[in-house]
Image (tube, helix red, strand yellow):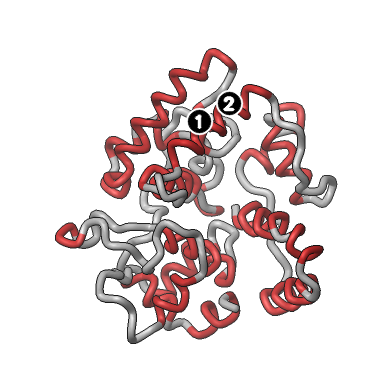
Amino acid sequence: MRRPTLLDVVVAMAGAVAAFPGMDQTLADVEKRQGPLSTSLVGDLAELADKDLSTTVKAIKNILTGREMGQDASETARSKYIADEMHAAMVGSAGRCNGVARQAVRMGFHDAGTWSRSTGKKGGADGSILLARECDERQENRGLLEICAQMRVWFDKYKEFGISMADLIHGGHRHNEPSPKGLLPSPSASADSLISMFEDKSITPAGLVALIGAHTMSRQRDVQPERAGDPQDSTPGVWDTLYYRETTSSDTPKRVLKLQSDVNLANDAHAWNVAVV
């Protein structure tokens, strides 16, 4: 689970290496400090034969195992139409990420995050957040009702073209069976419990800190309802690294609401300092 996320970042940075002299050495230094990336295959990647994997999932497996590079490939017309429609819905009038984009990122994690080594084959990035009505019935998903409704609209529109619910969310196989409960982090969790939870998902402490960087565009709604809409950094419409600095700063703008779990992790010197450049 961790590897595809970090791999996407590395692939995205490939052009920057050529454009900015010295960037290749910077990336090498970051990789050296963080240690080797996880190559663990989980879920369908480990259990299913290649012939049973979708094209997207098979490509991810090949990238993880070094058999294929994470390069751009030609898109089918079907995927392009869907991507264009999703993009238009997720960008506001100022050209920045809007609430649909924020919920879509969180939805992807809430679906994928319901897997761990200890629970085996159940859960994970399989679309069960919608197919098993977890979005409607689980308390931790109550802030995702709008994106769940929108995803169902897109699914109804494109399912006749062979698109599954899991394709829309992740690009993977779908499962109707509910995922295990209790595998998503609490907004008040301690650093130790967070590190332990995510290591059971094959994500190292450095990978966890990189993952929560997604909070750079989040706006909390339910942790403190009286402050619904308050962001976790001062530029929630932009995917940047300001979140890391403001989480540890004593002079953060008043409107920024720091999640206690994020603060706890920031105070864990090993995890935070290893991952944050």
| Crowd around label 2: few <14 · some 14–19 · many ≥20 (10 Å) | few
| Above/below status of 188 relative to 152 | below
Number of marks present in the image shown: 2
* Mark 1 surroundings: few (<14), some (14-19) or many (≥20) residues within 10 A: few
| Residue visible at 40% across and 54% down in the picture | 184
With 89 as the anchor, is 187 left or right in this view? left
Percent x, y of residue 66? 82, 51
Q: Are marks 1 and 2 in contact (CB under 8 Å)?
A: yes
Q: Position of residue 18 (x, y in %)?
A: 81, 63
Residue name at image x 47 percent, y 72 percent: 242
Number of the label disc, if any, that sits on residue 81? 2
Picture quadrant where residue 82 is located = top right
Q: Amino acid at mark 1?
A: Glu
Q: Residue placed farthest to the left in the image? A: 226
Residue 68 higher or lower than 80, as above or below: below
Residue placed furthest toward the front = 94
Q: Using the image as rendered, state which of residue 7 and residue 136 is in the foreground.
A: 7
Could you tell me the amino acid type at mark 2? Tyr
- The residue beneath circle 1 is 85
Residue 262: x, y in percent? 39, 71
For the residue pair 110 and 82, the one nearer the viewer reads as 82
Q: Quadrant of residue 146?
A: top left
In the rendered view of the protein, which quadrant contains the C terminus?
Answer: bottom right
